[in-house]
Every structure is written in structure tokens, then in C-alpha cells.
Amino acid sequence: MAEQPASKKPRGRPKSQFSDLSGGTIQALDRGISLLVTLSKEGELSLTDLALSVGMPPSTAHRMLSTLQKHGFVELDAASQHWAVGLEAFRVGSSYLERTNLVDSARAVMRDLAQQSGETTNLAIADNGDVVFISQIESHKPIRAFFLPGTRGFMHASGIGKALLANFSRAEVEKILQKKGCPEFTAKTITTPSALFAELEIIKQRGWALDDEERFLGMQCIAAPIYNSFSEAIAGVSVSGPTVSFLNNSIAEIGHRVKQAAAKITDSIGGVTPKR
């Protein structure tokens, strides 16, 4: 039998991993993410080695890296000419850890709050001008508030939304209002910026917010903000339920309990509640 010829080692850079991208993928973004992932695994790489690792022309890799560098996602060591993951990539990545830690840390406190109040407790964050619910402990009552994880809502008509807005700068709130407006959902919804800012000042002073049938008639919500280690409001916890369950003389008491629960969650994630 004739001897089979030995296979030749391919020359040049490896085959690009981007040649079979689906029509729904943005190639430039995909390439940029690949560069970040490779740097996260390897630590530091020269432009040539990084380009070879991802199967990309060095000139293309350099353009991608320059864009990422502009936004702080990668850094270039001038002496060694090696690229590495930048501080902004750490900040973005740590926000996921912070959120994951937040959900885990909040569960026990939310459960206790639900038992004390007899109502549903919620955990939510702000995202792109919306309030987004990420966790809930349901009440066993036949009439109760219910939000699936991922449910979005307008911040101006939400207990947690207003609790967070009260901790944002005026410029940040105005930016959200310019984008989202103040749509009316019920006769009690706050629909003007002036009325909202007046309400936010009260919330900031007492430390908790009330959604008084502003989103749904017959439903109320009392919420307080949760802070990170920089005393920035990153989330909120709330008690929600039918209006008949919130007697006027108990709202302040529930507000105090919710505020205490938020402080416990803040402590559990290494956060710092600002002093007023």
C-alpha cells in the first residue's frame, strides 16, 4: 500500500471565527466582544498575538481595540505594547455580580417583610428609564400584586420607581422624563414634572415612597431604596397590595418597616445608606 502523504500544517492566521455569522448578528460587535473575551482569558497580549488568536487582520483588530479603548473597555501598556481588559469592562461586569448578589441577599429580608405585612414584596432596579422587577415574594391572599421577573414599568407611577428617582440628580430625572414623559394611568397618577419633583423631595426626606393607586386603581405600594458601597441607589424593595389592606393609620408604620428592610439589604451587600 502506498504511503499516504503527511498533512500540511496550514499557513497564515487561523480561519476567522466570524465567517459563518448569522444574518441577525452585527459582525463588528461580535468581533469586539471576541477581543474582550480573549483578553479576559489571556491577561495581556500584543496586537499581533491577539489578532492571530481571534483570526482577525491586525489592522481590523487595532481599529476595534481603539474603539474599545476610547470607552475604557481595554487598555494599552505603552511600554510593552500589550493590550489588556480595562476598568470599564470590570465596572460593567461587576454590575452583574452586584445584581446577582442583590437578589440572593434580599430574599430572606423580603420573606420576613412579606410575613410581617401579609402582602407581596418586590425587588426592582432602574434600567433605561424604566423600573424593572427582578424578584418577588408573593402573598397568599386571593387579591395581590403580581409582577413577573423582567416586567417593566414607568418610574413616575411606581413606588420603587419614585424611591429611586428621589435619589437621582435633577438632571437625571429630567432626562428620564424627556424620554418617557408622565403618562396618566389613573386619576391619581402624577402627570407633571413640578408635581413629581415636589413628591420626590418628600420621599427623599422620609426615606420611603408611596404609590397611592397611581398605576392601578385599588392597589397601593410602599417602597424604599437600596444602596451600594458608594451610597448610590441601585434598587428598591416594596410591599404591594390592595388599597383596603393599607389603612391610612398604618401606611407610615409600613413605610418604616420597608425602610428598615431596605437598610438590611443594603448592609448585606456591603452598601452604605446615606445620612440625611
Image: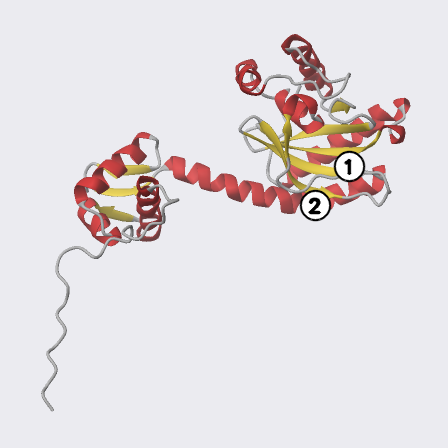
- Which one is in front, 45 or 3? 3
Tag in front: 1 or 2: 1
Which quadrant is home to the N terminus? Answer: bottom left
- Which one is in front, 12 or 98? 12
118 to 255, vertically: above or below: below
Query: In the image as oriented, which residue stretches furthest toward the bottom?
Result: 1
Tell whether 91 sits left or right of 111: left
Tell me the residue at 65%/18% (across/down).
183
In percent of width and height, residue 240 lies at 78, 33
Tell whether 241 sits left or right of 76: right
Tell whether 268 sits left or right of 216: left
Query: For the residues marked 1 and 2, what is the alpha-carbon distance in whole angstroms?
Result: 17 Å
Check residue 107 in the rendering and tell me which mark sits there, or answer none.
2
Q: Secondary structure at mark 2?
A: helix
Residue type, mark 2 in image: Arg
| Upstream in sequence: badge 1 or badge 2 | 2
Q: Residues within 10 Å of mark 2 (few under 14, many from 20)?
A: some
Which quadrant is home to the C terminus? Answer: top right
In percent of width and height, residue 178 lies at 54, 15
Tell whether 128 sits left or right of 248: left
Q: Which residue is mark 1?
A: 145
In percent of width and height, residue 219 lies at 80, 29
Occupied quadrant, residue 162 = top right
Tell me the residue at 25%/34% (across/down).
66
Tell me the residue at 18%/38% (across/down).
79
Residue type, mark 1 in image: Ala
